[in-house]
Image: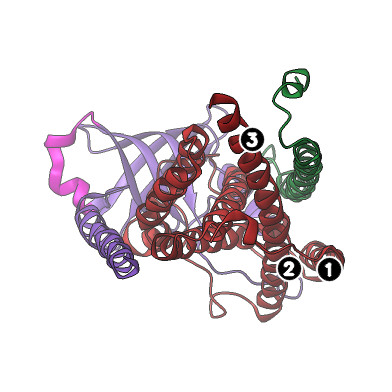
Chain colours: A red, B green, C purple
């Protein structure tokens, strides 16, 4: 399997996906901001839940995709798994950073601090470092095959931290509250959260399509440069 | 205690940052895609262009 | 050849799983973000002056906030042990009686926990305000009473 066998995406369908994503995302934000009342105890700031939780969910989903693609790459050595893995890693970094920023904005008026080294926050920061490291390692590797192999190993071993991030609030004493559930939230809040989770998940698919297409294009460019440079050396 | 900040500005800032970051990322992906396609086109146009590649820079 | 790769993949997954179990298992025992009042009292003289975190609930009717000198006194409890906490500066807006808190500071020989940072630990429960209930104002009136009284 070589890079030239990779499929060419269909731009028409991507446009439809983009429009649907934008629509659902706007509906989610509007519902979170205007449809439901603010929390009785926290007031307006609790509306951050509707973007903070979906962002954290996408971060973990992304890194799970990196893990699966990395395993598939090591088994099949098909470059498409590597390109899907790097696409998911980059998107995961964006949403991890977003979740951290939103959490910080939520923490200051409720907890009283922007940041504290509690197990949830610390393991999340480690998660961000792992995947930034993943991209840094990739940028140093000149040989595409070696790059794919090494980053697949990081993608598998690095995933160790992801379930720990989720379980941290259950395993250890933290300042961060445990995960919300339909039992801990009013019904209308649950629906708005689910709407936003759906909107973010659709956004994830949209971003993956775009990022994967970019990865294929960049890989083609690299391949052409490599063969051209080889020609020059000999 | 009346001087305590209300949480509303934090909430508004959070939503604005979310939209801004996501819009920025989509914009970046578009830019990078355009650049990659351009590089691909120029590389394919002269696959054996050992001499011309110097003038690319 | 392909079978070897499958084994390498499975091996890596197994290693990752083992690391999860070992690291997390070890951390589970050792990571302590804050001590409870009972644990702190048990350590006693051992930890006098050491910088640490203490977590528990604000004991109802124990809050004494003096806005003139910016001093906050309250009792922190885990249902078993109660410890007095002294802090400077206004607490976060959500600080109230019965609320979970984590305080940073040190335990003094006089049995008072001197805190420089009070953090409020809120729950994962969210609900709309009931008829006639206004978010925040509940808290505000409570604290004004405290300040006045």
Subunit of label 2: A
**Residue C58 visible in rendering:** no
Q: Residues within 10 Å of mark 3 (few under 14, many from 20)?
A: some
Mark 2 and mark 1 lie on one chain; the one further toward the N terminus is 1
Q: Return the residue found at the far front.
A: A234
User: Which residue is located at x 29 percent, y 62 percent?
Assistant: C8
Residue depicted at 39% across the width and 65% down the height? A75
Residue hosting label 1? A27
Q: What's the CA distance linking mark 1 and mark 3?
A: 45 Å
Q: Which residue is mark 2?
A: A199
Which disc, if any, is residue B42? none
Secondary structure beneath label 1 = helix
Find numbered disc 2 in the image and state the secondary structure of the residue it sits on: helix
Task: Determine contact: label 2, label 1, CB under 8 Å.
Answer: yes
Q: Earlier in the sequence, mark 1 or mark 3?
A: 1
| Main SS, magenta residues | helix
Residue located beneath label 3 in the image: A225
Please tell me which residue is depicted at 73% across the width and 21% down the height of the picture: B51
Q: Is residue A85 left or right of residue B23?
A: left
Q: Is residue B9 left or right of residue A57?
A: right
């Amino acid at each position: 399997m070589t890079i030239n066998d990779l499929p060419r995406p269909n731009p028409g369908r991507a446009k439809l996906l983009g429009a649907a994503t934008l629509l659902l995302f706007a509906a989610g934000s509007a519902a979170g901001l205007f449809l439901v009342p603010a929390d009785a105890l926290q007031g307006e700031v609790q509306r951050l839940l509707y973007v903070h939780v979906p962002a954290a969910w996408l971060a973990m989903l992304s890194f799970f995709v990196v893990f699966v693609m990395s395993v598939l790459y090591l088994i099949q050595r098909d470059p498409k798994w590597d390109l899907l893995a790097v696409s998911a890693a980059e998107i995961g970094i964006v949403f991890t950073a977003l979740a951290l920023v939103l959490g910080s904005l939520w923490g200051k008026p409720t907890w009283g601090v922007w940041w504290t080294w509690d197990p949830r926050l610390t393991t999340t920061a480690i998660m961000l470092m792992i995947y930034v490291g993943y991209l840094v390692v990739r940028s140093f590797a000149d040989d595409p095959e070696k790059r794919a192999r090494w980053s697949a190993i990081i993608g598998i071993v690095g995933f160790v931290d992801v379930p720990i991030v989720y379980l941290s609030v259950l395993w250890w004493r933290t300042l961060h509250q445990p995960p919300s559930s339909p039992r801990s939230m009013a019904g209308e809040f649950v629906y708005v959260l689910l709407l936003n989770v759906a909107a973010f998940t659709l956004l994830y698919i949209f971003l993956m399509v775009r990022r994967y297409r970019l990865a294929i294009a960049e890989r083609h460019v690299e391949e052409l440069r490599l063969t051209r440079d080889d020609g020059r050396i000999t | 205690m009346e001087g305590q900040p209300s949480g509303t500005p934090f909430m508004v800032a959070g939503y604005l940052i979310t939209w801004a970051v996501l819009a920025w990322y989509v914009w970046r992906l578009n830019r990078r895609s355009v650049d990659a396609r351009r590089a691909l086109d120029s590389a394919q146009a002269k696959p054996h262009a050992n001499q011309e590649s110097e003038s690319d820079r | 050849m392909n079978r070897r790769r499958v084994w390498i993949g499975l091996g890596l997954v197994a290693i990752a799983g083992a690391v999860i179990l070992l690291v997390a298992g070890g951390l589970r025992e050792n990571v302590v973000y804050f001590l409870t009042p009972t644990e702190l009292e048990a350590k006693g003289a051992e930890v006098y002056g050491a910088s640490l975190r203490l977590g528990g609930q604000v004991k109802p009717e124990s809050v004494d906030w003096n806005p003139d000198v910016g001093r906050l006194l309250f009792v922190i409890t885990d249902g078993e042990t109660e410890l007095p906490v002294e802090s400077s500066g206004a607490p976060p807006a959500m600080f109230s009686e019965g609320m979970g808190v984590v305080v940073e500071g040190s335990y003094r020989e006089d049995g008072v926990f001197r805190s420089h940072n009070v953090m409020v630990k809120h729950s994962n429960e969210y609900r709309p305000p009931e008829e006639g209930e206004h978010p925040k104002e509940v808290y505000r009136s409570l604290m004004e009473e405290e300040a006045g009284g």
